[in-house]
Image (tube, grey):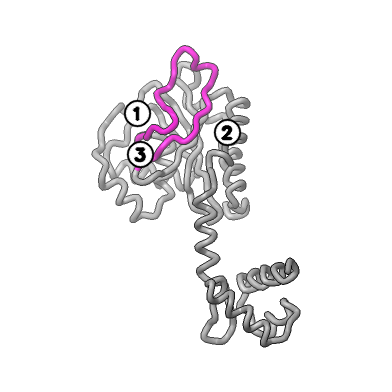
Amino acid sequence: MSQSIRRAVDLIRRAAEHPLSLTEAAEVLGVHKSTALRILQTLESARFVRRTGAGTYVLGSGIIELSELALGSMDLRQFAAAPLRALQRETGHTVHLAQLTGDEIIYIDKVDSPAFDAVKLPSRIGRAVSIYASAVGKTILAYLPTEERDRLLSHVVFERFTPTTYADRESLDAELLRIKDQGWAVDNGEHDTYVMCVAAPIRDSRGQVIAAASMTAIEVIASLDQLKESLPLLLDTANQISRELGHPADLG
Protein backbone atom coordinates (compact mmCIF):
# COMPACT_ATOMS: atom_id res chain seq x y z
CA MET A 1 0.00 0.00 0.00
CA SER A 2 2.78 2.46 0.94
CA GLN A 3 4.49 1.85 -2.42
CA SER A 4 1.22 2.56 -4.25
CA ILE A 5 0.77 5.81 -2.35
CA ARG A 6 4.35 6.84 -3.14
CA ARG A 7 3.79 6.15 -6.83
CA ALA A 8 0.57 8.19 -6.79
CA VAL A 9 2.50 11.07 -5.18
CA ASP A 10 5.17 10.74 -7.88
CA LEU A 11 2.41 10.83 -10.48
CA ILE A 12 1.01 14.08 -9.09
CA ARG A 13 4.50 15.60 -9.01
CA ARG A 14 5.06 14.64 -12.65
CA ALA A 15 1.72 16.16 -13.61
CA ALA A 16 2.82 19.39 -11.90
CA GLU A 17 6.02 19.46 -13.96
CA HIS A 18 4.52 18.85 -17.40
CA PRO A 19 1.44 17.37 -19.12
CA LEU A 20 1.42 13.64 -18.45
CA SER A 21 0.35 11.07 -21.04
CA LEU A 22 -1.39 7.84 -20.10
CA THR A 23 1.67 5.90 -21.24
CA GLU A 24 3.98 7.92 -18.99
CA ALA A 25 1.54 7.59 -16.11
CA ALA A 26 1.56 3.80 -16.49
CA GLU A 27 5.38 3.83 -16.46
CA VAL A 28 5.51 5.97 -13.31
CA LEU A 29 3.01 3.72 -11.56
CA GLY A 30 4.51 0.51 -12.88
CA VAL A 31 1.09 -0.78 -13.93
CA HIS A 32 -0.88 -1.52 -17.09
CA LYS A 33 -2.48 1.43 -18.91
CA SER A 34 -5.97 0.35 -17.88
CA THR A 35 -4.98 0.40 -14.21
CA ALA A 36 -3.18 3.71 -14.65
CA LEU A 37 -6.34 5.14 -16.22
CA ARG A 38 -8.45 4.11 -13.23
CA ILE A 39 -5.94 5.72 -10.85
CA LEU A 40 -5.90 8.90 -12.91
CA GLN A 41 -9.68 8.98 -12.94
CA THR A 42 -9.71 8.64 -9.16
CA LEU A 43 -7.23 11.52 -8.83
CA GLU A 44 -9.29 13.51 -11.33
CA SER A 45 -12.47 13.02 -9.27
CA ALA A 46 -10.62 14.51 -6.30
CA ARG A 47 -9.39 17.32 -8.60
CA PHE A 48 -5.76 16.42 -7.90
CA VAL A 49 -5.19 16.13 -11.65
CA ARG A 50 -7.10 17.48 -14.62
CA ARG A 51 -7.49 15.94 -18.08
CA THR A 52 -6.73 18.36 -20.91
CA GLY A 53 -8.34 18.50 -24.34
CA ALA A 54 -5.22 16.79 -25.72
CA GLY A 55 -5.82 13.78 -23.47
CA THR A 56 -2.90 14.50 -21.15
CA TYR A 57 -3.08 15.13 -17.41
CA VAL A 58 -1.94 18.24 -15.53
CA LEU A 59 -2.12 19.42 -11.94
CA GLY A 60 -5.68 20.00 -10.75
CA SER A 61 -7.27 22.72 -8.64
CA GLY A 62 -7.67 20.37 -5.67
CA ILE A 63 -3.95 20.50 -4.99
CA ILE A 64 -3.99 24.29 -5.17
CA GLU A 65 -6.85 24.41 -2.67
CA LEU A 66 -4.91 22.15 -0.30
CA SER A 67 -1.91 24.45 -0.64
CA GLU A 68 -4.05 27.46 0.23
CA LEU A 69 -5.39 25.68 3.31
CA ALA A 70 -1.86 24.75 4.38
CA LEU A 71 -0.66 28.32 3.91
CA GLY A 72 -3.59 29.62 5.90
CA SER A 73 -2.88 27.25 8.77
CA MET A 74 0.77 28.22 9.09
CA ASP A 75 1.47 30.16 12.26
CA LEU A 76 3.53 33.08 11.04
CA ARG A 77 4.38 34.11 14.56
CA GLN A 78 5.78 30.65 15.29
CA PHE A 79 8.02 30.69 12.22
CA ALA A 80 9.22 34.21 12.95
CA ALA A 81 9.78 33.94 16.72
CA ALA A 82 13.39 32.72 16.78
CA PRO A 83 14.72 35.00 13.99
CA LEU A 84 13.04 38.06 15.54
CA ARG A 85 14.49 37.36 18.95
CA ALA A 86 17.93 36.81 17.47
CA LEU A 87 17.62 40.17 15.69
CA GLN A 88 16.66 41.92 18.93
CA ARG A 89 19.62 40.41 20.78
CA GLU A 90 22.04 41.40 18.04
CA THR A 91 20.82 44.97 17.55
CA GLY A 92 19.39 45.83 20.96
CA HIS A 93 16.35 47.48 19.31
CA THR A 94 12.67 46.68 19.78
CA VAL A 95 11.47 44.33 17.05
CA HIS A 96 7.92 44.05 15.68
CA LEU A 97 6.07 41.65 13.40
CA ALA A 98 2.94 43.02 11.70
CA GLN A 99 0.41 41.38 9.39
CA LEU A 100 -2.53 42.52 7.29
CA THR A 101 -5.66 41.15 8.96
CA GLY A 102 -8.90 42.13 7.28
CA ASP A 103 -8.64 45.86 6.66
CA GLU A 104 -6.11 46.50 9.43
CA ILE A 105 -2.41 45.98 9.93
CA ILE A 106 -1.95 44.33 13.32
CA TYR A 107 1.10 43.75 15.48
CA ILE A 108 1.25 39.97 16.00
CA ASP A 109 4.58 39.86 17.85
CA LYS A 110 6.87 42.25 19.68
CA VAL A 111 10.26 41.81 21.33
CA ASP A 112 11.01 44.75 23.62
CA SER A 113 14.41 46.36 23.96
CA PRO A 114 15.86 46.54 27.49
CA ALA A 115 16.62 50.17 26.65
CA PHE A 116 12.91 50.91 26.87
CA ASP A 117 12.48 49.83 30.48
CA ALA A 118 11.93 53.44 31.50
CA VAL A 119 9.94 54.54 28.44
CA LYS A 120 7.67 51.95 26.81
CA LEU A 121 6.66 52.21 23.18
CA PRO A 122 2.90 52.48 22.62
CA SER A 123 2.86 49.42 20.36
CA ARG A 124 1.50 46.13 21.67
CA ILE A 125 0.56 42.72 20.29
CA GLY A 126 -2.96 42.73 18.88
CA ARG A 127 -3.01 46.50 18.36
CA ALA A 128 -3.66 48.00 14.93
CA VAL A 129 -0.95 50.25 13.53
CA SER A 130 -1.45 53.23 11.25
CA ILE A 131 -1.70 51.88 7.74
CA TYR A 132 0.02 54.92 6.19
CA ALA A 133 2.08 56.45 9.03
CA SER A 134 4.20 53.45 10.00
CA ALA A 135 7.08 51.58 8.41
CA VAL A 136 5.33 48.20 8.61
CA GLY A 137 2.10 49.64 7.24
CA LYS A 138 3.81 51.30 4.29
CA THR A 139 5.84 48.16 3.58
CA ILE A 140 2.74 45.99 3.30
CA LEU A 141 0.86 48.63 1.31
CA ALA A 142 3.73 49.01 -1.15
CA TYR A 143 3.49 45.39 -2.28
CA LEU A 144 -0.28 44.98 -2.38
CA PRO A 145 -2.04 44.69 -5.76
CA THR A 146 -3.25 48.14 -6.83
CA GLU A 147 -6.95 47.29 -6.44
CA GLU A 148 -6.46 45.96 -2.90
CA ARG A 149 -4.38 48.99 -1.92
CA ASP A 150 -7.01 51.35 -3.34
CA ARG A 151 -9.73 49.52 -1.44
CA LEU A 152 -7.89 49.78 1.88
CA LEU A 153 -6.96 53.44 1.43
CA SER A 154 -10.47 54.41 0.32
CA HIS A 155 -11.52 54.08 3.97
CA VAL A 156 -8.62 56.16 5.29
CA VAL A 157 -9.07 59.72 6.49
CA PHE A 158 -5.58 61.14 6.12
CA GLU A 159 -4.35 63.03 9.15
CA ARG A 160 -1.06 64.86 9.60
CA PHE A 161 0.20 63.48 12.91
CA THR A 162 3.63 65.12 12.60
CA PRO A 163 5.49 67.29 10.07
CA THR A 164 6.85 64.15 8.37
CA THR A 165 3.51 62.33 7.90
CA TYR A 166 2.54 61.45 4.32
CA ALA A 167 -0.88 62.99 4.83
CA ASP A 168 -2.29 62.79 1.30
CA ARG A 169 -2.62 60.05 -1.29
CA GLU A 170 -0.28 61.62 -3.84
CA SER A 171 2.71 61.88 -1.50
CA LEU A 172 1.98 58.45 -0.01
CA ASP A 173 1.87 56.83 -3.45
CA ALA A 174 5.27 58.34 -4.29
CA GLU A 175 6.65 56.97 -1.02
CA LEU A 176 5.22 53.50 -1.70
CA LEU A 177 6.93 53.44 -5.10
CA ARG A 178 10.26 54.25 -3.42
CA ILE A 179 9.71 51.51 -0.86
CA LYS A 180 8.94 48.88 -3.50
CA ASP A 181 11.99 49.96 -5.49
CA GLN A 182 14.45 49.81 -2.57
CA GLY A 183 12.87 46.87 -0.74
CA TRP A 184 12.42 48.45 2.71
CA ALA A 185 10.67 51.33 4.46
CA VAL A 186 11.34 53.89 7.18
CA ASP A 187 9.16 55.75 9.66
CA ASN A 188 10.84 59.06 10.34
CA GLY A 189 8.67 60.07 13.28
CA GLU A 190 5.58 60.03 11.04
CA HIS A 191 3.08 59.10 13.75
CA ASP A 192 5.02 59.96 16.90
CA THR A 193 7.85 62.42 16.44
CA TYR A 194 10.14 60.61 18.85
CA VAL A 195 9.75 57.11 17.31
CA MET A 196 12.06 55.96 14.49
CA CYS A 197 11.57 52.70 12.60
CA VAL A 198 12.77 50.65 9.63
CA ALA A 199 10.83 47.72 8.17
CA ALA A 200 11.27 44.95 5.62
CA PRO A 201 8.77 42.73 3.77
CA ILE A 202 8.10 39.06 4.52
CA ARG A 203 6.95 36.85 1.63
CA ASP A 204 5.15 33.53 1.46
CA SER A 205 5.80 30.61 -0.89
CA ARG A 206 3.96 32.40 -3.69
CA GLY A 207 6.19 35.45 -3.38
CA GLN A 208 3.39 37.59 -1.95
CA VAL A 209 4.22 40.03 0.84
CA ILE A 210 2.04 38.96 3.76
CA ALA A 211 3.75 40.71 6.67
CA ALA A 212 6.55 43.03 7.69
CA ALA A 213 9.28 42.93 10.33
CA SER A 214 10.66 46.10 11.85
CA MET A 215 13.20 47.58 14.24
CA THR A 216 12.08 50.53 16.34
CA ALA A 217 13.86 52.98 18.61
CA ILE A 218 13.16 56.20 20.47
CA GLU A 219 15.17 58.94 18.76
CA VAL A 220 17.18 59.83 21.88
CA ILE A 221 18.43 56.23 21.93
CA ALA A 222 18.96 55.70 18.19
CA SER A 223 18.44 58.08 15.28
CA LEU A 224 16.96 56.89 12.01
CA ASP A 225 20.44 56.83 10.47
CA GLN A 226 21.70 54.68 13.34
CA LEU A 227 18.77 52.29 12.89
CA LYS A 228 19.54 52.02 9.19
CA GLU A 229 23.04 50.81 10.03
CA SER A 230 21.36 47.56 11.16
CA LEU A 231 19.23 47.35 8.00
CA PRO A 232 21.25 44.44 6.52
CA LEU A 233 20.47 42.40 9.65
CA LEU A 234 16.76 43.25 9.36
CA LEU A 235 16.68 42.28 5.69
CA ASP A 236 18.46 39.00 6.45
CA THR A 237 15.91 38.28 9.18
CA ALA A 238 12.95 39.02 6.91
CA ASN A 239 14.45 36.80 4.22
CA GLN A 240 15.04 34.02 6.74
CA ILE A 241 11.40 34.12 7.84
CA SER A 242 10.31 34.17 4.19
CA ARG A 243 12.36 31.05 3.52
CA GLU A 244 10.70 29.35 6.50
CA LEU A 245 7.38 30.13 4.80
CA GLY A 246 8.59 28.49 1.59
CA HIS A 247 9.72 31.52 -0.38
CA PRO A 248 12.63 30.57 -2.69
CA ALA A 249 15.61 32.84 -2.09
CA ASP A 250 16.30 33.21 -5.82
CA LEU A 251 12.93 34.89 -6.45
CA GLY A 252 14.08 38.07 -4.70
- Mark nearer the viewer, 3 or 1: 3
How many tags in the picture? 3
Residue bounds of the magenta highlight? 104-131
Q: Is residue 8 left or right of residue 78?
A: right
Q: Tell me the residue that label 3 is attached to.
A: 131
Q: Foreground residue, 75 or 234?
A: 75
Q: Amino acid at mark 3?
A: Ile
Residue at the location (48% across, 40% down)? 212
Label 2, secondary structure: give it. Answer: helix
Q: Is residue 95 left or right of residue 147?
A: right
How packed is label 1: few (under 14 Cα within 10 Å), some, or many (20 or more)? many
Q: Tell me the residue that label 2 is attached to.
A: 84
Mark 3 or mark 2, earlier in chain: 2
Which residue appears farthest toward the top when viewing the image? 118
Label 3, secondary structure: give it. Answer: loop
Residue at the location (30% across, 51% down)? 151
Mark 2 and mark 3 in contact (Cβ < 8 Å)?
no
Mark 1 or mark 2, earlier in chain: 2
Residue at the location (66% across, 73% down)? 11
Label 1, secondary structure: give it. Answer: loop
Residue 226 seen anywhere in this rendered image of the structure = no
How packed is label 3: few (under 14 Cα within 10 Å), some, or many (20 or more)? many
Q: Tell me the residue that label 1 is attached to.
A: 191
Mark 1 and mark 3 in contact (Cβ < 8 Å)?
no
Residue at the location (36% across, 54% down)? 146
Query: Could you give the CA–CA distance between mark 3 and mark 2, rounded to whole angstroms?
Result: 22 Å
- Mark nearer the viewer, 1 or 2: 2
Q: On the rendered image, what quadrant is the N terminus found in?
A: bottom right
Vertical side of 52 occupied by 225: above or below? above
Which residue appears farthest toward the left when viewing the image? 157
Q: Foreground residue, 19 or 31?
A: 31
Query: Could you give the CA–CA distance between mark 1 and mark 2, rounded to whole angstroms?
Result: 23 Å
